Amino acid sequence: MTEPLPAAGAHGGDGPRIARALGIPAGEVLDLSQTLNPFAPDVARLLGRHLDAVGHYPDDAAATELLAETMGVDPGRLVLTNGGSEAITLVAGELGGRVAAEPEFGLHPRDSDGPIWRSDPQSPTGHLATPDLEAAVWDEAFYPMATGRWTAARPGVTVGSLTKLFACPGLRLGFVIADDVAALTRRRPHWSVGSLALAVLPELLAAADLPAWQAAIADARSALASALEARGFEVAAHDAPWVLVEAPGLRERLAPHGIVVRDCASFGLPGQVRIAVPDEAGLARLLAAIDQQGGSGDDR
């Protein structure tokens, strides 16, 4: 490596920093620190048909109507955002709140009181919420990949991310479902969602096959967990498109191979890593790197 290994980011997506440290193009990094749909359509190819959109200011009215219809929600309760992070920021700024318990996703507010926030599936454990759990704000960023459905349509507020579902974190698309959309819209910066994202959204929604994606992700998660367990790792695989692995030092061992996994120290889980479910080629590359490193390194 040409530079020291960068410290793990608090929210994953460390691929570009690792690429700089290795002196390689970012596209050569297998970034499993960010959880993206490994079976999403080729968004870059779709974008090529909409490049003229960058020549005009965005108008999100039609895209909002289409997304609401696709999700089966009232368009008057839906607001598009510049990714899931803006959705969380808008709701946290309007309502405040606190998490139900730790560990929980780092961008959720940690006030001393206020409405309860929960992620579903829970981050980082990966469990889907049981019917007895309650919250005022639900973060469903990974819900479609875990269930094959757009939303649980629960009372209260829901925040979500389309960039994870369509594996395009550089193309910021998120949403909030809430009764008081007007208050959130007032907080949202003008022209929050770019014209290019709005233009390609109809094609993304037309290409979506949530039940098929959920089934494929479940199979790929099982293959990942089985392969890691066969190599001596302790793996927790539940409903989410990732697995948790007890593997101190694995991030540092994989980085020279251009592979990044999520350090869970920011969740209060030192020694554990979160590995996003890869496609078949990504799994083969991950396992080859692990095998070169001697598996888990645990002689028990």
Image: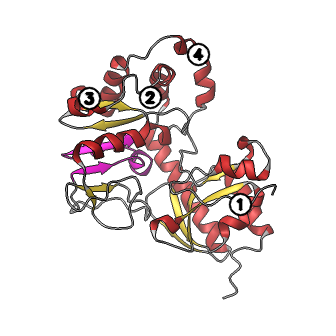
Relative placement, left or right, of 165 versus 232 is: left
Q: Which of marks 3 and 2 is nearer the N terminus?
A: 3
**Closer to us: mark 1 or mark 4?**
1
Spot occupied by residue 75 in the image (x, y as percentages of width and height) = 25, 26
Alpha-carbon span between mark 2 and mark 1: 38 Å
Please say if 22 is above or below 244. above
Alpha-carbon span between mark 3 and mark 4: 29 Å
For label 4, the residue is 51
**Closer to us: mark 4 or mark 2?**
4
Q: Is mark 3 on a helix, strand or loop?
A: helix
Please say if 72 is above or below 158. above
Tell me which amino acid carries mark 2: Leu
Alpha-carbon span between mark 4 and mark 2: 18 Å
Q: Which of marks 3 and 4 is nearer the N terminus?
A: 4
Q: Nearer the viewer, residue 158 or 87?
A: 87
Q: Earlier in the sequence, mark 4 or mark 2?
A: 4
Alpha-carbon span between mark 3 and mark 2: 27 Å
Spot occupied by residue 283 in the image (x, y as percentages of width and height) = 67, 56
For label 1, the residue is 5
Which residue is most to the bottom? 300
Tell me which amino acid carries mark 3: Arg
For label 2, the residue is 205
Q: Which of marks 1 and 4 is nearer the N terminus?
A: 1
| Residue 186: image tag | 3
| Quadrant location, the N terminus | bottom right
Q: Give the range drawn in magenta.
A: 136-160
